[in-house]
Amino acid sequence: MISGNSLLCDGRFFHVRCCAHVLNLIVQEGLSVASELLENIRESVRFVKASGSRKDAFAACVESVGIRSGAGLSLDVSTRWNSTYDMLARALKFRKAFARLKECDRNYKSLPSEDEWDRGERICDFLKPFSTITTYFSGVKYPTANVYFLQVWKIERLLKHYADCGDFRVEEMAMKMQSKFDKYWDQYSIILAMGAILDPRLKVQILKSAYNKVDPSTSEEKVDVIVQNLKDLYKEHREKAWTTSSFSTIPTAHELLTESPLEDDPNYDVFELERSIQPGSDNTKSNLQNYLDDPRLDLRSFTDMEVLSYWKGDGQRYGDLASLACDVLSIPITTVAAESSFSIGGRVLNPFRNRLLPRNVQALLCTRNWLRGYAVLEGDIEEFFDDGIEATTSMASSSGV
């Protein structure tokens, strides 16, 4: 029996690292190798964006070589690795336009060589899945604990693939990223891997198959560790729920002196006997074991299934496991959304408005969200606010806030 206020399993599953932050550290480690390889591409973008006349000249070059321009060039930021990917992805589309610019502007001296462009394409292909996974990790409208395992597994497989791709520079990037991956995710996160097991489309079978593709010699051991920890967590969760319900049924002095209406029920004595039995003391299988033994749902047939809705509906047949599943699946695997929400404070509290009362700051933030919605996580949050926050603040000023 455990204390009602203690953490389950002594709190060993309480701390979860921000997955987007860990992924950022991993990719930044690889980009430290590629920085000098991309210098000419970066300088080319910087050259074009330095003035309006150069932008006009470059636009003419784009038109002359027949490129249909979509998103324009963007310069990367050292603290955001995905901005480097965006810079590469956009610059590579204008490869011929940069060559034409070299012919038209003698001041342009940083044109990348063909080898540099080719390597930039390989690095861009390498980084693309990481950008997609970062966006997926940062989702706020769906449970994230169940998506963690397969995405981290994809990262590990990508690193192993590019560590032997034939380009020694990209291989060096992959190996440095692998060392950082091993530091944080060598054993993955056990509590978040449990989230994958509690997804009825994945369960133990998918985890075992995934581990087999990485290293068949250790797959059984790794799966057993996760399953055993899930059983321990379920046992303590069940005992804690039983302890809480036991305390809630202790009768008051008034109830002891007053005849209980339940005593008129012919099954009253049986209810009392059942209440005295601790969970798991009988020989029947637990709800967790029943869930693990039941067939896995076909992933192709349930691609759009909402996992929490499943546990609130069909999953209720597994009794007390449903509440544990909802708790685990609701674990946010990244703090990016929260950090983004707080990071706009500097945009509202600029040097000319730094004496605003807290309630007025809150009004500005709420008004901005009502008018513009929340920030798009895969985009640049600073650019997103450029055309929205001014309208919000000016409206608040005109209303006397």
Image (spheres, rainbow, N blue to C red):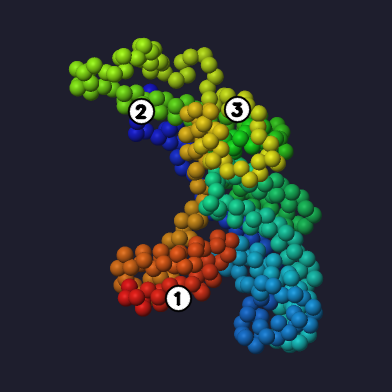
The answer to which of marks 3 and 2 sits earlier in the sequence is 2
Badges 3 and 2: C-beta atoms under 8 Å apart? no
Instruction: For the N terminus, give its image quadrant.
Output: top left
Which SS class for mark 3? Answer: helix
Residue at (64% x, 37% y) in the render: 201
- Which residue is the site of mark 3? 292
In the visual, does 6 lie left or right of 146?
left
* Labels 2 and 1: the sequence-earlier one: 2
Mark 1 residue type? Glu
Viewer can see residue 26: no
* Other residues around mark 3 within 10 Å, as few (<14) / some (14–19) / many (≥20): some
Which residue does the image show at 54% across and 45% down from the upper left? Answer: 143
Q: Amino acid at mark 3?
A: Leu
- How crowded pointer 1 is (Cα within 10 Å; few <14, some 14-19, many 20+) is rated as some
Contact between marks 3 and 1 (CB within 8 A): the answer is: no
Q: CA distance from mark 3 to mark 1?
A: 54 Å
Q: CA distance from mark 2 to mark 1?
A: 52 Å
Residue at 79% x, 78% y is 66
The residue carrying mark 2 is 244
Q: Is residue 149 left or right of residue 246?
A: right
Secondary structure found at label 2: helix
